[in-house]
Amino acid sequence: MASAIKNLSVYDDSNMPSTVGMSFGIVVSAWNADITHALYEGCLQTLLKHGVSEDDIRTVQVPGSFELPVGAKILAGAKRFDAIICLGCVIKGETQHDEYINHAVATGLTNLSIASGIPCIFGVLTPNSQEQALDRAGGKHGNKGVEAAVTAIRMASLRKEIAKPTSKIGY
């Protein structure tokens, strides 16, 4: 079980790809702002740590997690980002609203990624409680924003690597 692991955000930063020339969009949900802003800080600091210039990061805020795919689509329309990171938090309540929202957001971001060719990273916490959310937003289990940034860098690098011509035919 993932919660048995102390810090889920640990990664080997010695094998991270270069971010030279890369640009990232970040979409942050305003709902559960104490959680989502902590995710954003972890995400931003990770991008900066790996050499992304502040000028190459564009952040927008949307009302809630349900709006993350639309925010990502707006950024994708600019055609200047190598990856778009979506950060949100949907805490389970007394109804099944969390399941509907989480499924819609995951499906929306997957479809947008495939249609646009721009990786749209699902950095949405889906905890059962506020305490679990805090544990994953810089608490004892790490910061999902860090994980989302690492994923974005790796996917953007893959996208750039595959787009490079490998050889020329002729002269």
Image: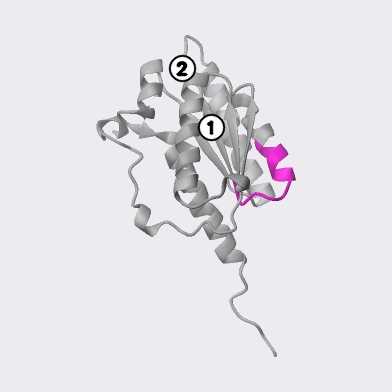
Q: Which element is circle 1 on?
A: strand
Q: Pointer 1 and pointer 2: residues touching (CB < 8 Å)?
A: no
Q: Residue at x 52, y 37 (%)?
A: 122
Please provide the residue range marked out in magenta.
72-83
**Vertical position of residue 151 compared to residue 108: above or below:** below
Q: Residue at x 49, y 52 (%)?
A: 51
Q: Is residue 2 visible?
A: yes
Q: Residue at x 49, y 59 (%)?
A: 18
Percent across and percent down for residue 114 are 64, 48
Residue 171 figure quarter: bottom right
Q: Is residue 54 magenta?
A: no
Residue ID for mark 2:
92
Q: Is residue 114 left or right of residue 122?
A: right
Q: Which amino acid type corresponds to the residue marked 2 in the rendered image?
A: Lys
Q: Which amino acid type corresponds to the residue marked 1 in the rendered image?
A: Leu
Q: Which element is circle 2 on?
A: loop
Q: Quadrant of the N terminus?
A: top left
Disc 1 crowd, CA 10 A, few/some/many (<14, 14-19, 20+): many
Q: Is residue 161 left or right of residue 138?
A: right
Q: Is residue 136 visible?
A: no
Q: Is residue 74 magenta?
A: yes
**Vertical position of residue 39 compared to residue 164: above or below:** above
Of the numbered discs 1 and 2, the one sitting upstream in the chain is 1
Q: Residue furthest top?
A: 94
User: Foreground: 84 or 128?
Assistant: 84
Q: Residue at x 51, y 11 (%)?
A: 95
**Vertical position of residue 35 compared to residue 163: above or below:** above
Residue ID for mark 1:
87
Q: Residue furthest right?
A: 77
Percent across and percent down for residue 164 are 61, 69
